[in-house]
Image (spheres, grey):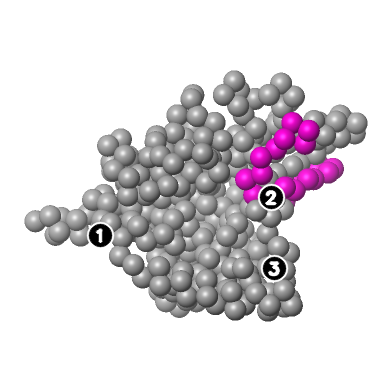
Amino acid sequence: MREPAFWYRPSSWMSRLLMPLGAIYGLAAGWRLQRRGLDAGVPVLCVGNYHVGGAGKTPTVLALASLLRDLGETPVVLSRGYGGRLRGPVKVDTGRHVAADVGDEPLMLARTVPVVVARDRIGGVALARSQGASVILMDDGFQNPAVAKDASLIVIDGNRGLGNGCVFPAGPLRAPLLPQLARTDALVVIGDGRAAEAVAAEAAAQGKPVLSAHLKAADASVAALSGKRVLAFAGIGDPARFFRTLRGSGIAVVAERAFADHHRFSNDEIETLIAEAGRDALTLVTTEKDLARLATAAGLPCQAKDIVPFAVTLEFDDSAQLRKFVSERLFQARQKNYRLNN
């Protein structure tokens, strides 16, 4: 979906009009948060956000997967598979599945870490454990109570924050902020913007770690676009963040085209972008997630072969703090499981 502009305005008549619906939605969502979930039997780390739309969960999941492997763990990502047709549970196979099957984010993640897609997260837990998971890393699902979490890391963009702070559909929040904050174990603030300062201060006041992080462009992606003028396009939660990252990496962005999150590009749309880039001698560049959605079972369509994917990773300003937090939560989870089973 494309986010309404009024979600990110401080005051809007549309937001005020929708507040009664937001109150009803918020009551239901807040009640749902209180339900007890299934104990997975292995530690469960959840990466989520307070609001709909993009904040940087996918690079956070990848960063955590790398850290868990450094700690000697075998992480398996559990995802709902948004945008895919398969209900699962199914292990994502990058040689067999396409984004239309399992969703763009799981397909992209599966290049690096094992991923299980399941609408029924309890069934997904069982499959993840059968794949040898020592830790289940949930991609989203913070507001879903089906599985108990041993730690919930909430991602927030420093430039966008929480918009107008209202609950859907009056604003972007998936549930009222206070009950969500109460169930947060750590806050990850991405970027240098100040829009997240208030919620970060509240989290810190409650004794929760606030971890600062930044997106870093892959050296190979920067080298591939060095000296070129580009037309950038993206259909993610926050295309503007992608365009900022490109410019911050020294890429000459001449034109940009934003689409709705998880947008499925038609052949006509791609051909239009290619024609526009060709007319102005520009190189087409997009995100890895967008390129994943363009691929079919036979690979990328011929007209998309020259589109350059721009890869980014998430770097934490204090990686030792993150490592300490994750290690402690894994230890506590295993202590709890030992007590329950002995």
Identity of the residue drawn at 70% across and 31% down: 308
Q: In this rendered view, identify the residue nearer to me: 187 or 37.
A: 37
SS for callout 3 = helix
Identity of the residue drawn at 62% across and 77% down: 19
> Is residue 245 magenta-colored?
yes
The disc, 1 or 3, on the residue closer to the chain's N-terminal end is 3
Residue 328 location in percent, x, y? 30, 58
Residue matched to label 2 = 260
Q: Callout 2, which amino acid? A: Ala
Q: Residue farthest to the left?
A: 342
Q: In this rendered view, identify the residue nearer to me: 77 or 335.
A: 77
Q: In this rendering, would 224 be left or right of 190?
A: right
Q: Quadrant of residue 208?
A: bottom left
Residue matched to label 1 = 332
The reply to whether residue 150 is visible in this rendering is no
Please state the total of marks drawn on the protein image: 3
Residue 222 location in percent, x, y? 69, 36
> Is residue 29 magenta-colored?
no
